[in-house]
Structure formats: structure tokens, C-alpha cells
Amino acid sequence: KCNNKIKMESSKTEAEGYDFDFVEDPSEDMKCPICLLVLRSPQLTSCCGHHFCCECVDKVLREKGPCPLCNVLSFTTMLDKGTERKVDQLLVKCSKESGGCSWVGALSKLNQHVNTDCAFSTTECQYSCGVNCTSREMKIHLLLCPKRPYVCKFCGYAGVFEEMSKMHWPVCRKYPLPCPNECGIRDIERQHMDQHLMKECPLSTVACEFSFAGCHVRGTQEKLAVHSRVNMQQHLSMVAGMCNQLMQLDVGARMQEELKVSTQEMKNVLKTHKEEMNELSLKTVSLQEEIEELKQENQLLKSYVFIPPFDIVMNSFHSQKDQNEQWIGPPFYSGVGGYKMCLTVDANGSEDGDGTHVSVYVSLMKGENDAYIKWPFRGTVVIQLVNQREDKNHFEQEIIFSHETGNEAAGRVMEGELAESGLGVSTYIKHTDLKYNVSKNIEYLKNNSLQFRIVQVQVKH
């Protein structure tokens, strides 16, 4: 059976020879005399020793025809693996050359390049969201796809991101909410909100604890605490007056019982007031603890949405350099509610740095805050290539989005996930400078990886 192992779009059918754009025109002995294309699964005839494509000569044999060259009626064929190896090593251009791909490689590598590595080949999203884009854009899309697998970080519920934002988070019992009274506490679990509003929130409006004695004041917990301290004498007078009034009345057993209840309520209120005074003395300590918690939460927020400074690691450097691949880092923001962007790195260089340098660029991305921030982006992104030997002598570079930077790099991203063009340095650092420098104790490339640090993003307008 014929082995059509290289299947690519062609002007001919896959049953015939290879109709690709070869770097050099193959010699005639590499072409099939029947379809006149480069041999696919070359078959050697027993009669005259010529080569034909497997499918081409099989068709002749099925129709019981003679050899197309020597006209012998009966002949057999066999796969010529030596010629097949020569065909596999022929250099071809990528079928997406017209779209901008400059890849050149062995014919045997064409399938892998087009189906896996080519940045100009299109593919469908693996999460079945319907998006079809280039491999380069797909790397970004998979990080942001609304149908990507997602686990709620608050309660552990597993689903897809789109379901989280539209269906789960609005009912998640552990989802953090800000106090509706704006008391300053922002991360109250939904299941604890009622308790907070009724017993803890200093801005909730409640009745004075001496309302049973006739006090009609209402206010927040904080204001009522002050009210109780300032008006303690008046409250006691109200309670005493109520007791005297009840004692002077000719009341039955029911009213006498109510008097006892009121007296007990007064005792309970006074006891509660004493406990509240003790709690107030502890608030200074608890406030300090809350400040520390807020600092930790702020640090957690920065790590969650990737706000500078933070480090990212580019692995498999040599593989990406050999294959001329562009590495795309994780998205990060200029600040909370700010511009979304990412770092892109050409390990084997681009433009002036092609083959000699590492090229580094900053690319803007479509973000959730785009409608509320000013465009085009103006500012400076400070990047360091980290010395992995010790925490000094890092290689630092500023990438400046000035008023001269065009909209293709600094404008708002309206189509796709990534800006049309990135801004950076094509000759960021020489390949020779990545190796370990013993005298300076500097090593940028270690364990086949580079470590970049996004130091800061300064926004200017």
C-alpha cells in the first residue's frame, strides 16, 4: 500500500507527486515520468529500473498496462528507500510563504512545521469556542478563552471561565463582596454578609440599646457607642423613671412581671455596655492586624493579575532559537485597572539582530479596562534580563512608548488579542553575552532558560 506520509495542500491530489515550492528545482531523476512531479513514495520497476510515484504506477498495474517507459507488459515494483530519503531531504518553502512565513526546511519536516510550528497557519480553539486564528495568536487566545477550564479560587467549584463570571460567581457563597454600607471591609464572604450587617458593620443603622426605656435615637454602631457613653446618666434616669412610674401605678401581676423583665434588661444592657468597653480597648490591636492583612491582600492581588515588579521564565531557549520561534510571555498589567500587555522574545533574533542577538519586544493586548483608559498608550516599560548567578549586574533596558510611536504598536487593540506590532529592541543582547562570564560572575542563560524581570511600567500622558 502506498505511504502518503506528507499530506499538504497542493494543486495536485495526494495520490500524485509532491507539488510544493522547492528552494531548488529537483533533478529529473527525482520526478515521476507520469505526473511530472517530485516522487512520492518512489517505486523502482523490475523491467527498466526507472522510478514512479507509488499511486501513479499502481494505477498502471491495476489496469494491466505496460511499463510507461519500456513498454514491457509484465513487471513488478518495490519501494526504493534510498531515493525516498533523498526526496525527504529536499529543501522546501512553507506553503504559507505568501502570508509572511519565511521558513525553509527539509520536506520531511514540512508537516510538523505547518501543523504545529508555523505562526501563519490557522487552527481552531481546542476548547470549541469557535475561534479560528494563527498559531501565534492561539497561544494568547488559550490564556483568555471564555470556555477555558477554570476552578473557582474561592470555593473550588470546577467549570469553564464563561460559566464562572455569568452563573457561578453571582451565587457563590464564598465569593468576596464589599460592605454595601462602605465601611471599608471589602472581602466579606457572601454567606457571612447578613451577620456582618447585623452585628459587625460600624455603619449599619440600629436602635439605641436603651430603646426599651424610651430612647428614640438610631444610628451606626460607632455613633451609638459614643451616644451610650455620653448619655449614660440620661439612660439610667430613663430606666429609673420608668420603674417609678410602674411602681406608682395600680398594676396587676402582669405589669409587675414586666417591671422585673425591664429591670433585668437594664442589668443585661449594663453588662453588655461593659463588655463593649472592653472590646473597644482591643480595637487598636485589631486595627493593626487588619492593616497587615490588607498589605498581604494587596500583595496577593499584584501576584494574581501580574502587576510589576515580577519575574517570568522563558524555558527551552535553544529549541526556540534553532526553530526561529517567537516566545510569548504571560499577560501583565501596568497597574490595577491599567493597560494589558505581554513580553515577546525572538530567541534567534529578528531584523538587525537576526541570528546574532536575542530580540525583545513589548506588545499591547486587548484588555478588560480598555474602554476606561486613555489611548494611545504612552509610557516606559523597564525590563531586566536577570543574572541567574547573583542578584546584581542584571541587564536592564527601557522600552519607551513616546508620541512618535505609531498606533500599530501603541494603539488600542480592536481585532485579535495582540497588537499588530510590538515595540522593543531587535539587538537586545548578543548570543555570546548570554554565556557564563567567570570574571564578572554573570550568567544570563542557565539550565536552558532566560529569566526576565518586569521592573515597572510608568504611564505618561
Image: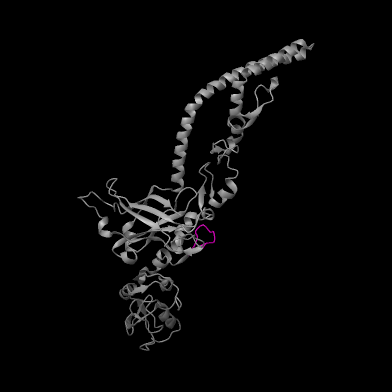
Query: Residue 37: x and y, percent?
Result: 39, 81
**Residue pictured at 38% horizontal, 61% vertical:** 326
Is residue 168 found left or right of 111 in the rendered image?
right
Query: Residue 229: x and y, percent?
Result: 59, 21
Is residue 237 found left or right of 201 in the rendered image?
right
Q: Main secondary structure of the magenta part?
A: loop
Look at the image and name its color scheme. Answer: one colour
**Does 7 appear above or below 426?**
below
Using the image as rendered, state which of residue 121 and residue 185 is in the foreground: 185
Give the total of numbered labels.
Answer: 0
Q: Picture quarter containing residue 221?
A: top right
Using the image as rendered, state which of residue 161 and residue 379 is in the foreground: 379
Write the start and end of the magenta stretch as one range. Answer: 123-131
Is residue 214 found left or right of 103 in the rendered image?
right
Using the image as rendered, state which of residue 112 and residue 145 is in the foreground: 145
Q: Picture quarter containing residue 178?
A: top right
Query: Residue 106: x and y, percent?
Result: 34, 71
Q: Quadrant of the N terminus?
A: bottom left
Residue farthest along the left direction in this orientation: 439
Using the image as rendered, state which of residue 410 and residue 104 is in the foreground: 410
**Does 301 appear above or below 75?**
above
**Does 260 appear above or below 197?**
above
Query: Residue 296: x and y, percent?
Result: 44, 38
